[in-house]
Image: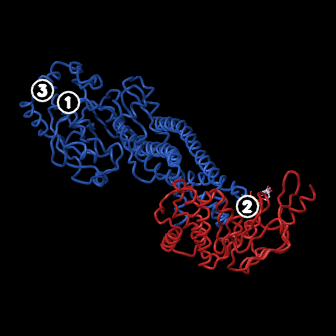
Amino acid sequence: MILLENIERGYNTESGKLTVVDIPRLEIEAGSQVALMGPSGSGKTTILNLIAGVIMPSRGRVRVDGIELNDLPQNQRDIFRTRRVGYIFQRLNLLSTLTALENVMLPMLFAGERSKNEQRTRAKELLAKVNLEHRLEHRPSQLSQGEAQRVAIARALANRVKVVLADEPTGNIDYQTGREIMELLREICTEKNITLLTATHNRELGNSFPRLIDILEINQALTAGKENS
Amino acid sequence: MGVFTLVYRNLSNKPLRSILTILSVALGVILLLTILIISSGLQESIVEGPRGHDLVIGAPGSPTQLTLSTLFHYEVPSGNIDYQVFEELKGDERVKKAVPMALGDSYQGHRIVGTDYTYFGDDPEEVEDLLIAGRFIEEAGEAVIGAKLIRETDLEIGSTFKGVHGIEGAHNGHEHDFTYEVVGILDEGQGVDDRVIFTDIESVWAAHHVYATHYSFFEEGQAVIHKIDSDACTHDDHSHNDHSHDDHSHDDHSHNGHSHDDHSHNGHSHDDFHYQAGDLELTAILVESTDIQALSSLKNELNNSSDYSLQAAAVSPVLRQLMEVISEGTTVVNIFAIVTLAVALSSILLALLSSVAEGRSDMAVMRMLGASQIKVMLIVFLEGVVIILLGLLLGTLGGYLVADFVSSYLESTTGIVINVFRLWPQQDILLGSVFFIGLGACLLPVISIYGDEPMEFID
Ligand SMILES: Nc1ncnc2c1ncn2[C@@H]1O[C@H](COP(=O)(O)OP(=O)(O)OP(=O)(O)O)[C@@H](O)[C@H]1O
Ligand SMILES: [Mg+2]
């Protein structure tokens, strides 16, 4: 389902090129639910962005749902991302000018696969699934953090995605709410047979997943960096 | 949900800024459009005003005043001239056409202009074509009214009325003891003539009782005067009896001499009009000369003669001077308008730039969700386009309304009529350039987001 091979990705900084991700191989099976564990700055977001096709590796190949991202031009990768990948961000998630309902409709607008009526109906269904049917017309500023994150989950599922990438989805929420939201997300992914990859620095959350990947073990950039310093 | 929902949400999310930006565009457009309409309207009416006449002959004074009062029915004439001048001009080989004009009275603020069909065209049939109803004047006591009078007065075909002394529409002027009957209505679109009452020269004289005292003069065979019959006189006589302003009637002073000064309480000096015994007078004569040489020789001859009771003013220099005044005024106001518009366009630029700055994280989220770069740029661009279009729409409506306001002010003060509600030459160019320059202003913020890495704004 997801395959990273011989990946390297870095950033150009003032002090020269900085390699933050160096992964010989990472494979995640279709329909599985995986936690990507690691401390802050260990490259979790960078890996999710590589999988989503937001950034490209400087070396190596990324394959998602049978598609070689390296072979796609940027606009094709945009389309791939809309239709195949649901992304829940670490922060700055919802569009502040749109209502909850419209935020969920947004990926469907970009995918261009549904009529406006279908968009609306599906968005309502999804919001009902995350127990927000009573908050459709609320703006993000009128939602609690937990509610906003549930809207983001509904939005990640708006198109018929194969993969959901969740970047620290419960980072800003209290423990209890975070657990409930995580359970809800996993439930839906199980039901729809969606591959779920969650980045977190929370060991307890990581341990609740069937598979836990410790980024320190797969990212050689970190060990190399340590040796250097 | 469509792209326009996003655009609308972006705009309505900051309503004050959006509205101010739209209004500033509208304001610039209002100014430019008003100036365009008023200046083109004025120039058109100035160009159409003269009806082919190239020389105006009247009493000495300012040539501009003479031209304006005769051709545009604006302001008071500088005085009167001897009727004999008209007879002489008609016989002059340099003169293709001479049109007599006699003014002095008004009805409900509308001037009564004594002239004949030659004012309107070369033959009587041509004049009939200008009427929408009735016929042209055939005898004294008949009047043809401009189209606007139907709305602005109670006159219609068959109505009778009496003129009031003074042409500035002083309602407190005394009424003349002479009854006119409306026999025809001019079609609309005659410019300044739309608001004027036309009659023949004899009626103006008769109203001022010159006719009575000079009956014998008419009898002597002046061709022009032949059509006067005793009717006008009878009219005069019998209406005189039940006249309520006997003490103001002209009878009094045509007996006791000359001066109208006794009546200057009507706010308008009677000095302009002297219907003294022994004279038949015109206010002005419009001349169409045979060619340019004839025009200048005629003009020089009249202005250099030892007879200081006349002046001849060539129409085109006066009009050119007027046009220059208008275009100078237009230039000044245009500079002001363009500055306003420049401010408006930069406010679009600023509004979009700040919208882009504030919306960077939103745009990054959209990119992360799979919106293409082009789509995100399009959303910003459309935001600008909507501002420009609404500004143009509002500005066009406002421009027409302000121009209409200005034109009714002009009409009430100068009589110059501008029919505002139509398409104007260069209006498309004006609105089009505002649109495209506005689009240019949108491009900068749009281009500024090109190549943005969504990641830089997300996490
Ligand atoms: N655009 C960038 N330019 C330069 N360096 C970057 C950029 N983005 C990330 N980095 C660096 O790459 C490293 C990995 O960043 P990343 O965001 O992937 O970490 P993370 O594991 O998601 O951390 P966190 O748990 O704090 O979100 C960090 O050291 C960060 O400073
Ligand atoms: Mg991160």
> What amino acid is found at the position of numbered circle 3 in the picture?
His
Quadrant of the image occupied by residue A40: bottom right
Residue B300 image offset from top left, x and y in percent: 47, 31
Callouts 1 and 2 on one subunit: no
Q: Residue at x 70, y 64 (%)?
A: A204
Front residue of B281/B253: it is B253
In the rendering, which numbered label is found on residue B245?
3
Taking the image as shown, residue A101 lies to the left or right of residue A201, namely left
> What amino acid is found at the position of numbered circle 2 in the picture?
His
Q: What tint does the image give chain B?
A: blue
Front residue of B28/B168: it is B28
Q: CA distance from mark 3 to mark 2?
A: 107 Å
Ligand 2 image position (quadrant): bottom right
Residue B190 image offset from top left, x and y in percent: 34, 48
Taking the image as shown, residue B148 lies to the left or right of residue A136, namely left
Callouts 1 and 3 on one subunit: yes
Q: Secondary structure at mark 2?
A: loop
State whether residue B451 appears in this view. Answer: no
Mark 1 or mark 3: which comes first in sequence?
A: 1
Foreground mark, 1 or 2, reads 2
Q: CA distance from mark 1 to mark 3?
A: 15 Å
Residue A68 image offset from top left, x and y in percent: 76, 77
Q: Residue at x 31, y 37 (%)?
A: B101
In the picture, one chain is red; tell me its letter: A
Q: Badge 1 is on which residue?
A: B208
- Mark 1: C-beta under 8 Å from nearest atom of ligand 1: no
Foreground mark, 1 or 3, reads 3
Image quarter of the C terminus of chain B: bottom right
- Mark 2: C-beta under 8 Å from nearest atom of ligand 1: yes
| In the depicted structure, whether residue B266 falls above or below residue A83 | above
| In the depicted structure, whether residue B199 falls above or below residue A101 | above
In the rendering, which numbered label is found on residue A201?
2
